[in-house]
Image (cartoon, rainbow, N blue to C red):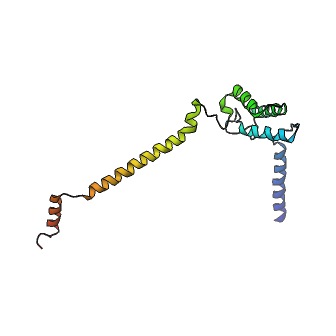
Amino acid sequence: MMKSVFKLMGAILLSLTVMSVYATPVDTYEFKSAENQKRALELAHSLRCPQCQNQNLIDSNSPVAQDLRLEVYQMVDAGKDYDEVIEFMTSRYGDFVLYKPRMEPKTYILWLGPFGLLIVGFLIGFYFVRKQRISQVDDQEISAEEQKELDRLLNRDDQ
């Protein structure tokens, strides 16, 4: 029994080891300084992979992301600042590569839309709550004729 458990554990360990060989290699770009490396990684984290669409350049393993990472690293090492790298990427791939789009007239709906929907939701909720309260007040009032009929049914006239 113990031998079979050890064999199973060995097989699992062997398969995990073999699978790790197929893992993608880590970028081995050497920066001129640790500050350049930090800036380049921050930039690559803030840019979206054009192929994967839901991953940044660091998290994506696509060939496009690898090429763009290398390009970002080289541009930062060449002395380009944040705005220059962002301008290059957006001119090449459009505003889609930015995880945080710029505040421009064409992106107002992205920035202000959620607040607008929230306000509309509150207004609709307020309208329905108010309408319900008004209908409850209307339902509670009865006319004099209805009161007489109620009294007659409850035999209050006799007393």
Report x, y in % for residue 71.
80, 31
Is 73 placed above or below 2 here?
Answer: above
Report x, y in % for residue 111.
58, 38
Figure quadrant of the C terminus: bottom left
Would you say 12 lies left or right of 98 here? right
Would you say 54 lies left or right of 62 here? left
| Residue 75 location, quadrant | top right
Q: Is residue 26 visible?
A: no
Seen as rendered, the residue at the extreme bottom is 159
Report x, y in % for residue 153.
16, 66
Residue 96 or residue 129, whichever sits in front: 129
Is 152 placed above or below 130 here?
Answer: below
Figure quadrant of the N terminus: bottom right
Which residue is depicted at the point 68% across and 33% down? Answer: 97
Report x, y in % for residue 91.
70, 26
Would you say 47 lies left or right of 124 here? right
Numbered disc total: 0
Is 117 placed above or below 144 here?
Answer: above
Residue 64 or residue 68, whichever sits in front: 68
Seen as rendered, the residue at the extreme top is 91
Would you say 62 lies left or right of 106 here? right
| Residue 123 location, quadrant | top left
Q: Is residue 144 visible?
A: yes
Which residue is depicted at the point 66% across and 38% down? Answer: 100
Which residue is depicted at the point 81% across and 54% down? Answer: 12
